[in-house]
Each structure stands twice: as structure tokens, then as C-alpha cells.
Image (tube, rainbow, N blue to C red):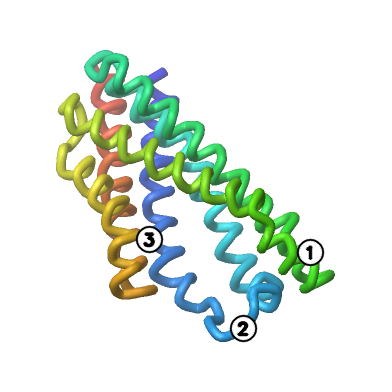
Amino acid sequence: MNGFTRGCGNALLLGGALMILINVAITPLLPRSEVSAAVMSGDIFLLRQSASGVAALLLLFGCLGLHLVQRLASGVFGASAFLLAFVGSSLLFAVEWANVFVLRAVARTSAATLAAIDKHPFMNLGFATAAGIFALGWFLLSVSLWRAQVLPRWAALATMAGLLATPVLQGLLGLAGAIAGNLLFGVGLMGLGRAVARSSTSASDR
């Protein structure tokens, strides 16, 4: 189990690093003046959403590692927060999968069909629900990590702060604000992932 938990910690570390890379290096390359179909048909969109799907999958294993390390100290609240974060990460992976393999194909085939899909309230509700559950789950999981004090509290605080700051800074500063918020979130995830991997290694040495 220690080897599996260590792997989950490394997955979280890589997931946080990939989120930083996506938001700092790839997202600014997306065209801002083109219509949605043209953007989604491009190679930069394919690269970004593929990387985002990998990051979501890594965070899926990462939150499992966090739960395994702190489950005895976090209680019912921690277990509930983990479950919500796990579901949210799964939904985020599903959204990125749909972006890469479904919506991009639609964009390359029919811009009018993509526009109709984009305006459909059910589609927007699905994407918003996935993003909301992901953010809420990881925020509550970070709160449980901060309370349990098993892993570095600074990393839990950075994760919480990044989740809260991203929509606020994006509203105030646009793309630069979103990058700053996601950078803070990614740093927190990397700190948590490194701590999980190191704690598992220490436990296996005893």
C-alpha cells in the first residue's frame, strides 16, 4: 500500500506541475479573436485539452493518495471531502475527454452545430456542474488537510487560496488573473503531492 500511496503522491505532484504548465505556457497561446469553432479546431486547443485531461487523471489518483495518508485523522468530514473531490476530478476528466474527442470533431465538421451545442443550456449546465463539484471538492479536501495537520498546512492553504483566487482574479485581471490563481493552486498541489510521496517513503522505511 505504501508503494501505491507514494505513486498517488507523485501523480499529484505531476498533476500540479502540469496545471501550472498548461495555464502559464499553453493557455496564453490560444487565439482570443477567433470564433469558438476556429479555436477548437486548432492544434493549440488539442494540446491544451489533452494536457488538461492528463492533469485531471493525475489529480484523480492524487486525491486518493491524500485520503489514504490522512484518513485516520480527518474523520467523516475528510472522507466526504475526498469523495466529492474524487467525483469532481472524474467529471473534469470526462469534460476534457469530450472536448478532445467529441466537441473538437464537431468543430472541425460543422461550426453551426458547435454553436448550437454551445448555446444549449443542458450542455452548459453539465460543464458548470463538473467545474463546480471539482472546485468545491478540492476546497473541502484542502480544508480537511489543514485541519488534520498530517501534511504541510501551507500547501493546503495554497490550494484553498488558489481555488478562491482564480475566479476573483480572473474577473479583475482577465487571463493574467486566471494564470496567477491557477499558479497558486498548482504550487499547493505540488507541495501536497511531494509530502504524500515522502511520507509514504518514510513509512516504508520503518
- Judge depth for marks 3 and 2 and give the one in front: 2
Distance of mark 2 from mark 1, alpha carbons? 17 Å
Distance, label 1 to label 3, CA atoms, is: 28 Å
* Residue 20's disc number: 3
Which secondary structure lies at badge 3?
A: helix
The residue to which callout 1 is attached is 106
Residue 172, horizontal then vertical, whole percent: 29, 72
Instruction: State the image quarter where residue 195 is shown.
Output: top left
Q: Residues within 10 Å of mark 1 (few under 14, many from 20)?
A: some
> Crowding at label 2, few (<14), some or many (≥20) Cα neighbours within 10 Å?
few
Quadrant in which residue 37 is drawn: bottom right
Q: Position of residue 132 (x, y in %)?
A: 45, 45
**Badge 3 vs badge 2, beta-carbon distance below 8 Å:** no
Residue at disc 2, secondary structure: loop
How far is the residue under mark 3 from the one under mark 2? 25 Å
Give the residue drawn at x 58%, y 48%: 125
Residue 34 is labelled as: 2
- Residue under the point 55% across and 37% down: 90
